[in-house]
Amino acid sequence: MIVRITPLTDPATSASGHRLAWLAAGDDGRPLGTAFLRVPASGGVADLELRVHPAERRAGVGTRLLDAVTEAATGLKLDGVLTEAVHEDSEGDAFCRARGLRRVLALTYTRLSLDDNVSVGRPVSGYRLVHWEGTVPDELAETFARSRRAMDDMPMDDAGYTPQPWDVARLHAIADAVARRGEILCTTAAVTDGGEIAGFTELVVPGDGTGDGQHYGTGVLPEHRGRGLARWMKAEAITLSRVRFPRLSGLLADTADSNTGMRRINDELGYRPVYRSCLYQVDLNPR
């Protein structure tokens, strides 16, 4: 089969980086697959999304797309390309292993049924919780941006993860992207007596309030850890989701196997394993 790879231009750029794209098509013009590479403004390792239509797999389409991506990433002098999570023992997992990609992170996906009883959050002295949907309120925007560094040291094992700087514009861009998908971004944050956000947890809910919601990030700044803030915030977010979205069935979370602290909290709150995924990396331009 003849496969034609066409590089595309994505006009959307931001302070955090830009995106490259490729389309794989057959000689008759039918689309076979796509690849998208999110290139961070600071360089380092770029994130890859690669898709091949199920009917066109095992014919070299994925390999051609991966070759085009790695060639471009090498030319940009990136350190590597990191795949999105692929289900363990899936076709995507087999593809990554067959192409010699390095497995760098293992994740366990868990689910909390909202029909189950959930432990009530235990308040932490010296802090209060605030909640909002969508874009962060203006009066909390600056401190929320500062609090995002709480995720900078999350366990990423051997993945070439480089934290990107946060500012209010990036917060707004992410909230806008969720809203454009028709979903609802719900945030619970712990605020000190001095008005600074010490930690946060985020949940994205389908726009119609049904099905399962998806946890995004949960983080506590290093200087505020060890007090029980993460568990309190997450338990309160669960309670709020039950009230705000009574037709929601459950909540999903993905946690690195090495993130023992968050895994323990999820276990205590009633999350149960559903499946496992892996991230793979192509190493380029070693320093």
Image (spheres, rainbow, N blue to C red):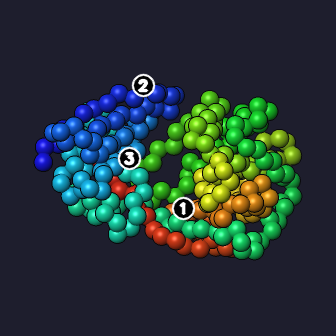
Q: Which image quadrant is residue 11 in?
A: top left
**Amino acid identity at mark 2:** Pro
Q: Residue at x 64, y 33 (%)?
A: 172
**Amino acid identity at mark 1:** Asp
Q: Secondary structure at mark 1?
A: strand
Q: What residue is disc 2 on?
A: 11
Q: What residue is disc 3 on?
A: 49
Q: Residue at x 46, y 32 (%)?
A: 17
41 left or right of 74 in image: right
Q: Residue at x 62, y 45 (%)?
A: 183
Q: Secondary structure at mark 2?
A: strand
**Amino acid identity at mark 3:** Glu
Q: What residue is disc 1 on?
A: 254
Q: How many marks?
A: 3
Q: Is residue 96 above or below residue 34?
A: below
Q: Residues within 10 Å of mark 1 (few under 14, many from 20)?
A: many
Front residue of this view, candidates 70 and 181? 181
Q: Residue lying furthest top in this view?
A: 11
Going from the N terminus, do you reach mark 2 or mark 1 first? 2
Residue 175 in sight from this viewpoint = yes
Looking at the rendered image, the quarter that the C terminus falls into is top left
Q: Secondary structure at mark 3?
A: strand
Q: Residues within 10 Å of mark 2 (few under 14, many from 20)?
A: few
Q: CA distance from mark 3 to mark 2?
A: 18 Å
Residue 279 x/y as whole percent = 40, 57
